Image (spheres, rainbow, N blue to C red):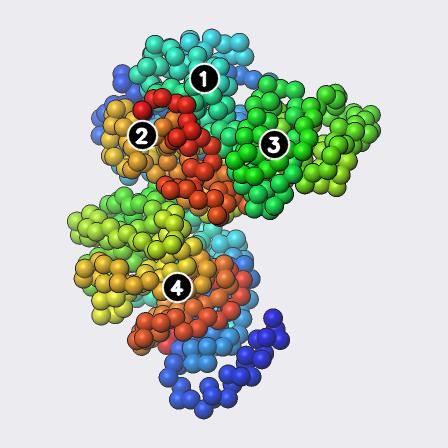
Amino acid sequence: MRRLAAVVLPVIGLLALAPPAMAQGTGRQDAGTKVMLIGYLARQEDPRTPLSFLEPVATDEGLQGARLALADNNTTGQFLNQSYRLVEQVLPQDGDISAGVKALADEGVRFVVADLPADALLAAADRPEAKSMLLFNARATDDVLRNDQCRANILHTAPSRRMLADALAQYLAWKKWTRWSLLTGRDPGDALYAEAVRRAAKRFGGRITDEKSWTFDTGNRRTDTGVTTIQSDIPLATQGPDYDVLIVADEAGDFGDYLDGRTWYPRPVAGTQGLTATAWSRVNEQWGATQLQNRFEKLAGRWMTPRDYAAWLAVRSIGEAAARTNATSFDDLTAYLHSPDFELAGFKGEALSFRAWNGQMRQPILIAGPRMLVSVSPQEGFLHPVTPLDTLGDDAPESKCRLNR
Amino acid sequence: MRFLLSCTLLLLAGPVMLAEPVFAETIFVSNEKDNQIAVVDGDSLQIKNKIKVGRRPRGITLSADGTQLFVCVGDDNRIDVVDIASGKVVHTLPSGPDPELFVLSPDGKKLYVANENDNMVTVIDVADRKAIGNIQVGVEPEGMGISPDGKILVNTSETTNMAHFIYTEKHNVIGNVLVDSRPRVARFTDDGKQVWVSSEIGGTVSVIDPAALKVIKKIKFEVTGVRREAIQAVGIQMTKDGKRAFVALGPANRIAEIDTGSFEVKRYFLVGQRVWNLAFSPDEKRLYTTNGISNDLSVIDLERNKVIKSIPVGGAPWGIVVKP
């Protein structure tokens, strides 16, 4: 508890110096400290309840990542006379997105971390007030947002489903586990994930031997009868032509964690559960990640999730741009964020930057087991004329985003 | 493995014993994974001893009188003090949380420690074994350098991406210089006129004028066949005449030699995998490097400009110091 206080206090100290609202989102304080506002826009949701009891039920995913990055920005900012304030705008479950955008605009916020699903993100980005804002998509993995539905006022710090699927496919190709059986859940997102897996199979030499849909009802995670049915249901659900690896598309975590150890064939599970391709995982302690994990756990009292990480990247991107340019104006920072000079260290061994053609942050993708880091993609040998990172997801020639053409 | 090693010992024992002892130095290597300090005889290039220390030893340096080793043991949140003669930890120093790197004041009285988890530099009085001050710096303090007169301390912070210049008399920060991503090591030139700071993710070395607090040169590296992202600058050493500088390039598995007059890279030495840090022999005829992934020490002959040997030293060698 003393440690938590030590982390939070300096931040509060800086906030106390900051005047409440600034007309342009940036401004000058008496002592010469420039205060920058960063908005955080989200809607309340039912807490995500993991199947495994080892994982906590998190109610503040995303937000804690933004708060940590704000503290990091402020520690750096004190040496540059820059200070940051997070304007948290968390709407009720059925809250009106446009009201949220307007409220942020009224406070003078122009940089907004959007922890929203795709439809709500687009609704926010298309508001008139958002024309003079820059939104960071720290949540939605939908590829359509990086293609036909891309927007000039959005940068994506969350990876796309195609980036995740490509990262996994490269690793499976390296392993020569090329026969995949694909098991897809009922949510619309699961179908999109499965689509990204099919595309990745074509790109990296995988072959989908069989496709199935998950149609069983697993019931409450605590019921004893549930476990009995799972034991008999899963062999049935996974029976079919032989394969090397079972790929599961279950983004909400409704059943995927039940698969390992129960499948028809004695084969590994990968995808959204088992061996997962993910932007972030607690198992990563390489490249100085220990420090980020420690800082996060002191602040939030739980592990950092990919959603927290994407929000952290968004807020840190703004801080990094302000530190590098020694500027605080929205236009200067936005120009720098979009420029090839922008680089962010993200604890994954190399610099992260934004793709000019669709605003996607290029980043290594972790291949994580439930308890250990297994690998990191891109894998050696998948070559690219500019950077191997662009072998993940839509490369410039493939992208249907027409913003910068 | 052990069998192989003892065979090598036998083969080398003969000629080495006959030879004139040219290199009398002892090399100390901190093995991050083994929680040990490997003691290598500079004459025979054989491991003489392994000293058990706390968990995750990284930063390592010699006491002013050369009889003791200070070792940052990050996972135990302290500094172990090793008596070299007996090869044992004799006491510990209170470093604050997660010490990774430190620097000893030129008079040998104070240790300045970077606390990676706490955005702080801790000042330790070596004789009293007490922390006597804290200095607030940027996020993830790492590299530590000190001016030859002991007046200016430089700390790098990995996530803030700055070199913080600190006045040691009052423990106050007098200036901050922005460098490329993830600065790791800071080193003053012996004349005190420059500070070299390596950036791991940025893959560069920034040469800073400490009087003006400005970057006067940014040294970049390019190795044929190695992708740019794998070039990650970490350890830095310079010869006493100030003419040759050497920079470890991490997963590029290379040491770059830089002409300090022109700041041009003169050559690259291929060493072991993921090279972290480096140290000269006292006569500067050799350079030793710690290679974290290949678990060995590379020996570079600086007269012939050749890598002449690699010595397995244990799990994840990281820090290195040479005692004459």
What whole-number distance in Å separates the C-alpha atoms at marks 1 and 2? 20 Å
Q: Could you say where residue A214 lies in the image, as x and y percent from the top left? A: 70, 24
Say if residue B143 shows up in the picture.
no
- Which amino acid, mark 3? Thr
- Measured as percent of width and height from the top left, residue A47 is found at 60, 21
A48 relative position to B288: left or right? right
Rendered residue at 65%/30% (across/down): A182
Badge 3: chain ID: A
Instruction: Classify mark 4: helix, strand or loop.
Output: strand
Q: Which residue is mark 1?
A: A121
| Chain ID of residue with mark 2 | A
Element under disc 2: helix
* Residue type at the position of mark 2: His
Mark 1 residue element: helix
Whole-angstrom CA distance, mark 4 to mark 3, is 40 Å
Quick one: B306 or A310, which is closer to the camera?
B306
The answer to whether the residues at label 4 and label 2 have Cβ atoms under 8 Å apart is no
How many labels were placed on the picture? 4
Q: Which residue is mark 2?
A: A338
Label 3 belongs to which residue? A272
Q: Which residue is mark 4?
A: B270
Task: Tell me the quarter of the picture where residue B138 sits.
Answer: top left
